[in-house]
Image: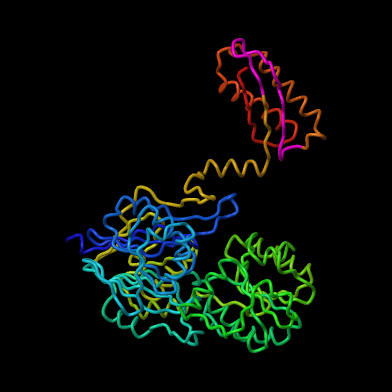
């Protein structure tokens, strides 16, 4: 069997987690990469801004990469592209017009636009290399221009669903191309990689138009301003807010850099319709009667620096929440963001706003299909093998059980993890082990990958117990103390109320140094380690806490 008679599927992200979606598909000596997303940091990743896939495998095989193909324009599918192109400049990137429009802004922001070769495609067109014919297929999602991908290869056809649902009344009228997906299934599919995010939810997801109906009820009864927060890429949601605002004679202000940028791109490309004279600048909000104003903003996830969060904290320069304002939080919390979201909602209530969120009224519907839609996709494609992606471990397990109930043998259902090499041909699917390096890269400010597990543990330690700094001056020749010891605390104890403890620490330091016989040997690392150990024991005995202890020893 030749190399082109089998496929290798190598997940670099997006399996066992929500976010940082990226999958390498290899056939012979060619690789096509599907998506390049980011994830948001968890609470344990203190100070981290973004999490991206580890692309060491792609760097090692860069000469084999023929394309990066994007399924749609959400951050968890395009957000790491700028970091990828730093290492893989000139790699062709394919996407639909809106997806590439959003990418251009991100690449420009990170000064990587010159490294990018962006090539647009439309659904039902194909592009070809020696071993790959890639065909995008229109699907419904919570953003326009979303596609699934059919990769036709000598080994067989692989279908990657991207993120999808079956919305029969989409806002833009662009229906899921069920007919084409069905024909591909009839032609024969080797393996299906399917979104499984909402496998735990029975039935079918509601149409996006349900949200528009709710907006109409809310806007018709609102006496003052209406503030609607959603993801900055949710063009359909913003379109519905604009439509209902026009219906009730309201002007619309867009707040948040990403919101303004994305909606301007969507408008230029024809995906967002806003009648002339509808949009106002943030500076004009206060000059209009409150019942004539709609504000569309970012911050639906409680992000501290987003516009809605700053309004809730009364820190926004141009918008102050007052009693009678109506705030719509038109999203559900990403796992891990729940506390931030509810903190923002509570603050908005404190300021007198009427806050409407999912659970109170249907102001959000998911972009991911429920269980019956996942079953429908399986039956349409009718693949030889099945592999769930885009889900946490429980979702992968639930999807696998569902596929087995539908008739797929257990050995034909792939349960993969990040870094696995899944090899598939017409006879079998196998796990060939792991690639050498895989996982996550943490982005902190301008630093890429320089925040390790050790750094995160230190940050957690500092956040939990604070630190104690010990400053000593030692004679270069004799090793005797000539300055100090000085002791300072941050986040451990309040110095003015802990004078006895600080004096005890100083005495312990003097005692340890007087009893050492090697202080003149310039072995300052040994002295520092001894002080960390002994002072740590003393502090735990007195306080039951373990601050980080930082000895600073200077030669004099």
Q: Quadrant of residue 543?
A: top right
Left or right of 11 in this view: 292: right
Residue numbers of the magenta segment: 472-493
Percent position (x, y) of residue 404? 39, 71
Name which residue lies at 37% across and 61% down.
Answer: 116
Left or right of 25 in this view: 239: right
Name which residue lies at 56% across and 51% down.
Answer: 48
Quadrant, the N terminus: bottom left
Residue 234's place in the image compared with 337, above or below, is below
Q: Quadrant of residue 298?
A: bottom right
Depth check: give the residue in front, 457 or 409: 457
Percent position (x, y) of residue 426? 24, 68
Residue 246's place in the image compared with 37, above or below, is below
Q: Is residue 180 visible?
A: yes
Q: How is the image coloured?
A: rainbow
Q: Residue 58 lies in magenta, yes or no?
A: no
Name which residue lies at 44% across and 62% down.
Answer: 21
Percent position (x, y) of residue 468? 68, 33
So how many labels did they put on this image? 0
Q: Quadrant of residue 324?
A: bottom right
Name which residue lies at 71% across and 68% down.
Answer: 318
């Amino acid at each position: 069997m030749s190399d082109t008679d089998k496929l290798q599927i190598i997940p670099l992200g997006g399996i066992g987690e929500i976010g940082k979606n990226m999958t390498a598909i290899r056939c012979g000596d060619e690789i096509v990469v599907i998506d390049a997303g980011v994830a948001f940091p968890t609470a344990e990743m203190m100070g981290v801004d973004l999490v991206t896939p580890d692309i060491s495998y792609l760097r090692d095989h860069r000469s084999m990469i023929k394309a990066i193909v994007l399924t749609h324009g959400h951050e968890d599918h395009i957000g790491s592209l700028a970091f990828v192109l730093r290492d893989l400049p000139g790699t062709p990137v394919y996407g639909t017009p809106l997806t590439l429009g959003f990418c251009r802004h991100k690449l420009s922001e990170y000064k990587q636009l010159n490294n990018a070769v962006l090539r647009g495609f439309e659904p039902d067109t194909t592009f070809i290399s020696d071993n790959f014919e890639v065909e995008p297929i229109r699907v419904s999602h919570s953003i326009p221009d979303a596609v699934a991908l059919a990769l036709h290869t000598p080994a067989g056809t692989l279908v990657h669903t991207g993120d999808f649902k079956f919305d029969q009344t989409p806002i833009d009228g662009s229906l899921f191309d069920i007919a084409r997906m069905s024909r591909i299934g009839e032609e024969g599919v080797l393996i299906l990689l399917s979104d499984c995010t909402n496998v735990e939810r029975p039935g079918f997801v509601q149409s996006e138009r349900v949200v528009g109906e709710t907006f109409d009820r809310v806007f018709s009864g609102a006496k003052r301003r209406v503030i609607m927060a959603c993801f900055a890429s949710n063009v359909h949601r913003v379109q519905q807010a604009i439509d209902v605002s026009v219906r009730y004679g309201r002007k619309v202000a867009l707040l948040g850099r990403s919101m303004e940028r994305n909606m301007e791109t969507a408008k230029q490309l024809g995906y967002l319709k806003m009648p002339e004279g509808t949009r106002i600048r943030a500076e004009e909000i206060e000059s209009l009667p409150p019942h004539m104003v709609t504000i569309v903003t970012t911050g639906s996830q409680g992000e501290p620096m987003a516009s809605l969060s700053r309004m809730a904290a009364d820190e926004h320069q141009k918008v102050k929440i007052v009693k009678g304002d109506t705030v719509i939080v038109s999203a559900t919390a990403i796992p891990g963001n729940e506390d931030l979201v509810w903190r923002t909602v509570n603050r908005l209530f404190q300021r007198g706003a009427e806050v409407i969120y999912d659970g109170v009224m249907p102001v959000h519907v998911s972009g991911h299909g429920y269980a019956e839609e996942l079953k429908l996709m399986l039956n349409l494609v009718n693949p030889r093998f099945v592999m769930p992606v885009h889900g946490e471990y429980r979702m992968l397990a639930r999807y696998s059980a569902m596929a087995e109930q539908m008739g797929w043998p257990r050995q034909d259902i792939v349960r993969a993890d990040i870094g696995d090499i899944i090899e598939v041909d017409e006879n079998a699917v196998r796990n060939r082990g792991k690639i050498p390096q895989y996982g996550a890269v943490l982005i902190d400010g301008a630093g890429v990958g320089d925040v390790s597990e050790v750094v995160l543990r230190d940050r957690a330690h500092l956040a939990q117990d604070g630190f104690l700094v010990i400053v000593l001056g030692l004679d270069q020749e004799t090793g005797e103390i000539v300055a100090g010891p000085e002791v300072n605390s941050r986040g451990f104890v309040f110095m003015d109320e802990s004078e006895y403890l600080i004096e005890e620490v100083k005495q312990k330091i003097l005692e340890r140094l007087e009893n050492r016989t090697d202080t003149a040997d310039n072995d300052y690392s040994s002295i520092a380690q001894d002080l960390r150990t002994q002072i740590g024991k003393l502090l735990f005995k007195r306080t039951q806490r373990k601050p980080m202890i930082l000895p600073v020893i200077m030669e004099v």
